[in-house]
Image (cartoon, coloured by chain):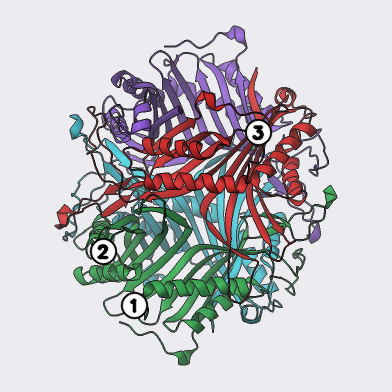
Chain colours: A red, B purple, C green, D cyan
Amino acid sequence: MLGPNQYGKEVIRVVRVTRDGARHGLKDLTVGLTLAGDLERTYLTGDNGGVLPTDSMKNTVYAFAAQPGIGEIEDFGLGLARHFVSSQSIVGRATVRIEEHLWTRIHAEAGGDHAFVRSGAELRTAEVTYDGASTTVRSGLRDLVLLKSTGSEFRGYVRDRYTTLPETDDRVLATAVDASWLHLIADEPAGGWAQSYREARRHLVETFAELYSRSLQQTLYAMGDRLLANRPEIGEVRLSLPNRHHLLVDLSPFGLKNDNEVFHATDRPYGLIEGTVVRAPQAGRREDS
Amino acid sequence: MLGPNQYGKEVIRVVRVTRDGARHGLKDLTVGLTLAGDLERTYLTGDNGGVLPTDSMKNTVYAFAAQPGIGEIEDFGLGLARHFVSSQSIVGRATVRIEEHLWTRIHAEAGGDHAFVRSGAELRTAEVTYDGASTTVRSGLRDLVLLKSTGSEFRGYVRDRYTTLPETDDRVLATAVDASWLHLIADEPAGGWAQSYREARRHLVETFAELYSRSLQQTLYAMGDRLLANRPEIGEVRLSLPNRHHLLVDLSPFGLKNDNEVFHATDRPYGLIEGTVVRAPQAGRREDS
Amino acid sequence: MLGPNQYGKEVIRVVRVTRDGARHGLKDLTVGLTLAGDLERTYLTGDNGGVLPTDSMKNTVYAFAAQPGIGEIEDFGLGLARHFVSSQSIVGRATVRIEEHLWTRIHAEAGGDHAFVRSGAELRTAEVTYDGASTTVRSGLRDLVLLKSTGSEFRGYVRDRYTTLPETDDRVLATAVDASWLHLIADEPAGGWAQSYREARRHLVETFAELYSRSLQQTLYAMGDRLLANRPEIGEVRLSLPNRHHLLVDLSPFGLKNDNEVFHATDRPYGLIEGTVVRAPQAGRREDS
Amino acid sequence: MLGPNQYGKEVIRVVRVTRDGARHGLKDLTVGLTLAGDLERTYLTGDNGGVLPTDSMKNTVYAFAAQPGIGEIEDFGLGLARHFVSSQSIVGRATVRIEEHLWTRIHAEAGGDHAFVRSGAELRTAEVTYDGASTTVRSGLRDLVLLKSTGSEFRGYVRDRYTTLPETDDRVLATAVDASWLHLIADEPAGGWAQSYREARRHLVETFAELYSRSLQQTLYAMGDRLLANRPEIGEVRLSLPNRHHLLVDLSPFGLKNDNEVFHATDRPYGLIEGTVVRAPQAGRREDS
């Protein structure tokens, strides 16, 4: 018997230039689409009568990028998700995942107004789901790499027979933030999607910088808590924080001391801390748009 | 408020040599561990009194690799999952994910019995979860790359205003199988874990090769269906099959025809087909060990 | 017979925190070391009497990061290169390759002065070679991703029987700059290594933005030429510029036009343009330090 | 002034099915092309009158894959390299680099003769250069991952003030072989390119397995030496061998001993041993075809 199933297109790379102002605008996205619905026939018999090709999904992304255009990624996702469900009777649920690659305009002395430099590895993200009745919008970011060189300790933990880790009251704490937050209402918030994103990002970054951290778990919770406290449009925050261990190098064989100054930055193995911070029940639940 | 949360250690690379026979044995694993339980204190206050360091988890993997040793990865996972739940009162659920890198012994003319060549990118996998009461064992594989140069078509699909894909009655079908299957009972099956894995893999590969495919969805279902039909120890199969598109190159500008002979192998965007095949209800549910 | 040979350690990840000011400093490097010399014995007989272990090389990087510290990467490379040649009689030539991962200090409202956010994928680089007599210092950068949405054409090229590319008088031009430049003298230039790097980077970026480009080759040459014209300390510039093709999407099947607005950003295959720009002979040759 | 320069197309993915026998054949290649010549005009002025677009180079690969077909990769490279130099007056030198992805036919019980499973990450390679007068053919392989669990030591090395590595008389030795060898004559050797490759690979693998290794350098030289001793068509072997360190885990804190049985497989930093083995002069030099 066929259980849960879905299909879609991954890694659709679309770049949209807007040429209507004095200076060009630029949007650079990677889009993933997933459709689910009454697809049993193709699985069981190979009858594709209800299957929209993933190639057509890809084409739809490019066509929508042209008309109506991309705008903010949350809106672009909403338009696509609603299109697939409303136009394909067999599709019961559409999920659109968008990663926005960020660019900064170059300010050159002698013109060159239409040139850009990629801002880094960090991505702004959106995930929109529509099932014909309710709509969910999550905004987020990925690969926001943060490090603090002090203001972090790790001690008082459980010691079992396999524990050799020394306690520390001053360590380097580094992570690559993968965060997403649920909008209580699937409509553009007051101030707009872009401002909501910028402020959310600011709260995450500042909490990491300001909080004296006793564990990466504590930092995670504080980041989500502050986001909820400051942004009423958001109902839930999911955070996944790899612990990018910076190991203090033993320099004593060389007659040198190491007062938290020289570290070996490892990439594997790594700790991974995951958690969700949600509004207390009285705060109301998200409404479907 | 804190919602769902968990933590663990990722990408623990352990290689175990067994030296008790005439020829060395070799096991090469990447292990990931995830613990969940009553961890609220560290998130809310940074009190680590209930937190087993992820460094200790890593040490445990190495210690268990020494004693009792690794054996089959399903057994290794079972031992680790049970250890964390039974030894840490605060841990309610432990999940162990293992990828086994496969090696083939080199048969050299002049000895060298203890040398190996890596078998490829394909990985054998296991995922074991224990929550104090029930145990779940999934076996699987990843990055099993398959291609058939004929015996695949794709037509009769929905055409909307964004559909440009031409129908084809003969195409290259290629994928990288990511599959896992649930054992109905979390104990070693008759014949052993290794034989169960080998046979499961054989059924997946042979189904791909033998089935005339009208869609990758149909191939997916047939692979899972045959696995369930032939292996009574298995209760459910999850498959994720990227469609590694091979695009027929238009050679007509060069005065050449292309009768399904020359293809551009693309890697992005790609279709992704996902599905679960489950036993019909009368077939019985898995029992907890 | 043994021909050219060398050995070394790759991907040494060292993070150095300086704690002597009001706010911590941070240096984050990946270092690669290569030694060459009279190493024939170990190759031919396995006699390691002249081989400094690569593990010791790694230790040396950490020890030097502690004392004298890192400073600018060119200086750090000079110290290491000279150390290996002067302390190991068998080593005839040492090459130190450094990639600096860049961080930006976080300005949080409530303190957190010692926190940083990673600036992106772009790397600042240095390569220092010392052979006992002469020293070579190359500075550079990698993964500086640039795009211009207009001001680029490609036409008038050769057409052979395999040419199908349409000419364009307005295209998106994008690349990931990999550049290095040779310092005429292996000593810190007036203004310092950091300023020299910043100015060199600025000239590369501005040339890309400002130049109306008839080919990526022309852009490459102009970037190097401007660097040489403005920075007397530099004697040669090497540039490797992948052409990150942005393909105009054909929207006509959907009844839409595409006036250079919607692009498919491909990653493979890609064009690769490489070139060196050197000072004309009268400009003098670099002197060894 | 413009110094050394070249341009080309990278990562052209071509899959060729041959359908003329009872069972289909399959060739799966990644091709890179580099042209050099009198290209100064486009660099200096953007005049593309002598520039063959990299898009046309890509088309040529697909057209040649159709007609005359691929055959062995050395021959495919020879045809392409000669084509570019002979058909483009401005091109002085063409280099063709080919990686062949290897597939194994699936032997299914119920037919499916045209299905294949990817053999792994290992690649067979060829690099052909033609400059109008002379031709060079290098065959090779990459990502051949080898490990021996005993029969390797490392001791007697230099100890400086930064050396902490303990000597070992029994270690795990692992590497990923990157090798290429020069054919003395740029024509198909007796027995054919495929047999020459298979035998070369066999000698590399067997030497690794059989040789008691005192250093990875010694292993490298022995591999090249045996290849030259057994294959008269080969004049030089280049080897690049990363040392994939397997670190013995200290289990003593857990009351366990570790007799070379449990290892942490690290990936960075890693040692890198490089060397060339050449025929002694009297053996004659390669002739140009």
Is residue D3 in view from this perspective?
no
- Give the label, 2 or 3, closer to the camera: 3
- Quadrant assignment, res B254: bottom right
Identify the mark at residue C69; answer none if there is no mark.
2
Residue B182 spot, x, y in % from top left: 51, 20
Closer-to-camera residue (A71/D280)? A71
Residue linked to disc 1? C188
Which corner quadrant holds the C terminus of chain B?
top left
Identify the mark at residue A129; answer none if there is no mark.
3
Q: Amino acid at mark 2?
A: Gly
Give the left or right position of residue A256, taking residue A115 as reference.
Answer: left
Residue A208 spot, x, y in % from top left: 40, 45
Give the left or right position of residue B248, taking residue C289 as reference.
Answer: right
Which corner quadrant holds the N terminus of chain B?
top left
Element class at badge 3 = strand
Chain letter, disc 3 residue: A
Residue drawn at point x = 45 percent, y = 35 percent? A225
Chain letter, disc 1 residue: C
Q: CA distance from mark 1 to mark 2?
A: 16 Å
Q: CA distance from mark 3 to mark 1?
A: 56 Å
Do dots 3 and 1 share one subunit? Answer: no
Pointer 1 local density, CA inside 10 Å: few below 14, some 14–19, many at least 20: some
Chain letter, disc 2 residue: C
Do dots 1 and 2 share one subunit? Answer: yes
Residue C173 spot, x, y in % from top left: 65, 65
Element class at badge 2 = loop
Element class at badge 1 = loop
Asked if C93 appears above or below D181 in the picture, the reply is below
Give the left or right position of residue C273, taking residue C27 as reference.
Answer: right
